[in-house]
Image (cartoon, rainbow, N blue to C red):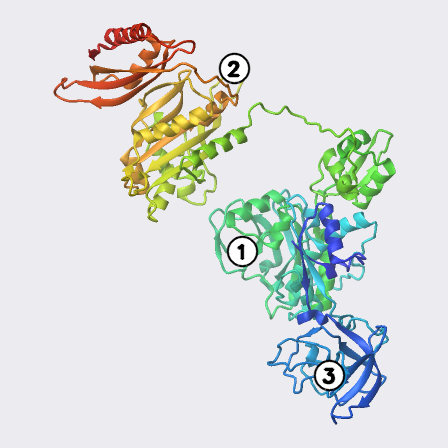
């Protein structure tokens, strides 16, 4: 939000510098992000002052030059050589002192004494100390074109003024620099979205009064052009004020009004519209002026639009309306989207002579919903959707009407209409001094607390020794509870004024969790990034066709539909993170990035019928589930001179799962082949306590084709919610074994149906004490062992933590393993 410091000073006395004002506002919660000077003309007449010519004599060596002495308020007069024919002793003149940079508006015919010539019109030049024909010159007496105020170069400017010598010339010409404060306004501070709103905070901070423009001059001068107003929904539009102004003339705004608007980055349009914009930024009260002739039937009806109807806004865009869009209509058609944007045909035109001025209060939620639906962000919607002051509408209407009369003429030609069936009352909040002192960390005293609150227009009443009732005006939409009142006291008192006590401590209302979900996610992110994965963020909204591409039993529920969806492609919330990731892969592959490893943390959304229970109503249950998903496609590594590239394989996905589970300290799990019909052509499921926690595999071609992918994709889906419960941050340290490990290999001929997982589980069953690891290093299938057989070459690592293993111990352990394989798997041991 932009605030003009010069404009702000219209309401409150501010001798402070711009930086001091910015520091005050930032300390009170209105963070000033930048302070930018605004110059009325280039250079802002910096270094140019008013002086008085004390003496003037002809130059002995130049007929057209004069040697003068000029008082510019310094300890000594300045010697200046001047070439102007009209210079004379006793004149009040404009002097550019040494070091000043001037921005002329025309080519200087002759270089002014002591300065170089300006090469082209408007080119800046600097005043330097010099000698002109042997005479010292320490400045320049200026003509109007030389300081950028006109085009005449006939002679120097001679002033009539009582201002003291040395006064900045900008003050004399009314060109003092303004400053623009850029405030990062937080959404809760709607009350400060105007110059008067900012002045209110400064009033409380500095203990100075603010001066609001008077509206006592407002007079109704006729009743011949009334407008009948009907409000269909007083909840969405609790207040509507309006009045007719007749006999005005639309044209350019006066310079002062244009200057105010340009100072905050707005372009002047015409005098009527400019006034509505001015009052909006002055008081934080949006207004709209309608061409009276465009109000068909002389009726304004505030109602909802028919679903699917079309309305053309002021920018010429046709917008399809919703039944939830509140419209300002005449007897025949809509004229504007209430509180957001006017219509193309009802606005003020150059030939307009009569307007109907509206100032209304709209419910913030209604404005926010419509503005988001149509993608409109206007100065009006910015304020309405945060909350404006419902009790200041009449004042704003009169203020704008008087300004329109001032800049465009006309007279008030109707009674003021004020629809306000249920006036908004002040909010009453009970406060205790004990809580105020506790939350601030310092005892301020009752008098100080009352002074601060009343300076913020918060009335303090029903006072006792224990506390009081705070009566909060409606425009303070951010003050809703006792803690908010305490915050108001603290921000005005100043955080920096609260000393740190020797026994500094903090209070908290909730226990800190043993496991931090964000920290765990961050550590997992670091792990995956370290092994070559890249993080992606995808949209939770997706196509309904994706869910129908999977079997119903593979999904936890039904689609969650989006009301008023922007498009069919974004009409449901995702039930699986597979397809949004496939879209990201396709996007990158189409841009020739084919070797990809992605991961994403995100949620899926599901709708289920609630299970009926005694005494509980039936209905719909909505579920959200947190996931971590991985995607692998293309080559596992780039081709180099040392090794050829190879495509990613199933075991690359398994390795990534192993890394993640190890990081989470989840080590006890079972695995089985994927059995439920789903996205995988083949895959593996990890189970803990018989619950599926990870599933991975090769995505079916039929699914990858939905996103136009033509290369294989491996997909991993972690149930992050459940894994978070199981994850442990504890670290157990063990002594490095002192005694050597021993490896023994076996060749097992087994049925093809037997998996390595079964071999490992059986080995851990038969040798619990000495077995440290099991690994398969070769698999053979061929006619030599039978068509339905395969041979595993398996290594077993044995170790005893207390002693060196002897050959008899090793043999006994291997005999137990071989007996188990022969008994339970029907293995043939190839010796």
SS label for mark 1: loop
Q: Residue at x 22, y 22 (%)?
A: 779
Rendered view: 180 above or below 802:
below
Q: Which residue is mark 1?
A: 333
Foreground of the two, 203 or 670: 670
Rendered view: 444 above or below 1:
above
SS label for mark 3: strand
Task: Residue 391: give x, y in percent of width and height.
Answer: 73, 48
Q: Earlier in the sequence, mark 1 or mark 2?
A: 1
Which of labels 3 and 1 is toward the front? 3
Determine the CA span between mark 3 and mark 1: 76 Å
Determine the CA span between mark 1 and mark 2: 53 Å
Q: Which residue is mark 3?
A: 131
Left or right for 122, reference 100: left
Task: Residue 315: give x, y in percent of width and height.
Answer: 52, 60
Left or right for 146, reference 456: left
Q: Quadrant of residue 136?
A: bottom right
């Amino acid at each position: 939000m932009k605030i003009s410091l010069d404009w702000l000073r219209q309401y409150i006395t501010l001798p402070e510098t711009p930086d001091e004002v910015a520091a005050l506002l930032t300390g009170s919660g209105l963070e000033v992000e930048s302070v930018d000077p605004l110059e009325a003309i280039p250079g802002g007449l910096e270094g140019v002052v008013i002086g008085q010519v004390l003496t003037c004599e002809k130059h002995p060596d130049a007929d057209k030059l004069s040697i003068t002495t000029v008082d510019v308020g310094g300890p000594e007069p300045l010697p200046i050589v001047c070439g102007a024919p009209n210079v004379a002793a006793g004149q009040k003149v404009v002097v550019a002192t040494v070091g000043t940079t001037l921005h002329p508006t025309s080519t200087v015919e002759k270089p002014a004494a002591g300065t170089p010539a300006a090469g082209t019109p408007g080119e800046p030049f600097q005043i330097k100390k010099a000698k002109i024909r042997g005479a010292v010159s320490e400045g320049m007496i200026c003509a109007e074109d030389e300081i950028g105020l006109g085009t005449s170069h006939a002679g120097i400017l001679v002033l009539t003024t009582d201002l003291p010598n040395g006064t900045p010339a900008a003050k004399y010409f009314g060109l003092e620099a303004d400053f623009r404060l850029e405030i990062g306004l937080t959404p809760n501070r709607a009350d400060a979205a105007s110059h008067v709103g900012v002045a209110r905070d400064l009033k409380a901070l500095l203990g100075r009064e603010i001066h609001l423009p008077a509206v006592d001059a407002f007079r109704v001068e006729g009743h011949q052009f009334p407008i009948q107003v009907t409000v269909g929904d007083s909840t969405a539009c609790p207040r509507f004020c309006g009045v007719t102004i007749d006999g005005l003339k639309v044209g350019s705004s006066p310079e002062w009004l244009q200057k105010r608007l340009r100072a905050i980055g707005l372009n002047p349009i015409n005098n009527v519209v400019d006034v509505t914009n001015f009052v909006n930024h002055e008081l934080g009260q949006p207004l709209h002026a309608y061409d009276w002739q465009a109000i068909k039937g002389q009726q304004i009806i505030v109602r909802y639009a028919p679903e699917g109807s079309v309305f053309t806004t002021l920018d010429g865009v046709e917008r399809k309306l919703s039944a939830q869009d509140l419209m300002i209509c005449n007897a025949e058609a809509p004229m504007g989207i209430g509180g957001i944007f006017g219509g193309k045909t009802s606005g003020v035109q150059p030939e307009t002579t009569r307007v109907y001025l509206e100032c209304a209060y709209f419910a913030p939620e209604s404005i926010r919903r419509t503005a988001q639906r149509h993608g409109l962000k206007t100065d009006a919607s910015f304020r309405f959707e945060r909350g404006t002051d419902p009790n200041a509408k009449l004042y704003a209407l009169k203020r704008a009407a008087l300004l329109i009369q001032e800049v465009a003429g006309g007279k008030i030609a109707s009674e003021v209409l004020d629809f306000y069936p249920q006036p908004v009352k002040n909010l009453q909040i009970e406060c205790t001094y004990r809580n105020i002192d506790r939350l601030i960390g310092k005892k301020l005293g009752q008098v100080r607390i009352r002074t601060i609150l009343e300076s913020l227009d918060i009335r303090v009443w029903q006072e006792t020794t224990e506390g009081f009732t705070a009566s909060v005006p409606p425009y303070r939409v951010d003050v809703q509870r006792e803690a908010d009142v305490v915050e108001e006291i603290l921000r005005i008192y100043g955080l920096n004024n609260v000393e740190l006590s020797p026994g500094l401590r903090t209070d908290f209302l909730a226990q800190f969790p043993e496991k931090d979900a964000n920290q765990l996610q961050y550590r997992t992110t670091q792990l995956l990034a370290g092994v070559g994965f890249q993080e992606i963020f995808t949209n939770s909204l997706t196509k309904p066709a994706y869910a129908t591409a999977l079997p119903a039993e593979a999904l936890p529920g039904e689609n969650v539909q989006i009301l008023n969806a922007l498009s069919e492609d974004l009409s449901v919330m995702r039930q699986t993170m597979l397809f949004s990731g496939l879209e990201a892969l396709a996007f990158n592959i189409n841009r020739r990035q084919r070797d990809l490893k992605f991961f994403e943390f995100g949620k899926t959304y599901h709708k289920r019928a609630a299970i009926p229970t005694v005494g509980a109503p039936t209905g719909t249950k909505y579920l959200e589930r947190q996931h971590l998903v991985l995607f692998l496609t293309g080559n596992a590594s780039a081709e180099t001179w040392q090794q050829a590239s190879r495509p990613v394989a199933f075991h690359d996905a398994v390795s990534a799962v192993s890394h993640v589970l190890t990081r989470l300290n989840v080590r006890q799990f079972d695995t089985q082949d994927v059995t439920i019909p789903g996205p995988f052509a083949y895959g593996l499921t990890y189970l803990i306590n018989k619950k599926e926690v990870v599933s991975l595999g090769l995505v079916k071609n039929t699914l990858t084709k939905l996103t136009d992918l033509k290369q294989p994709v491996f997909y991993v889906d972690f149930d992050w919610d459940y894994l978070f419960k199981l994850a442990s941050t504890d670290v157990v340290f063990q002594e490095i074994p002192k005694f050597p490990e021993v490896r023994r290999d076996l060749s097992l001929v087994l049925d093809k149906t037997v998996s390595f997982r079964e071999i490992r589980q059986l080995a851990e069953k038969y040798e619990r004490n000495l077995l440290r690891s099991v690994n398969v290093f070769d698999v053979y299938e061929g006619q030599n062992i039978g068509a339905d057989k395969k041979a595993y070459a398996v290594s077993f690592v044995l170790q005893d933590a207390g002693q060196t293993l002897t050959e008899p111990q090793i043999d006994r352990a291997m005999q137990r393993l071989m007996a188990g394989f022969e008994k339970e798997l029907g293995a043939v041991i190839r010796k």
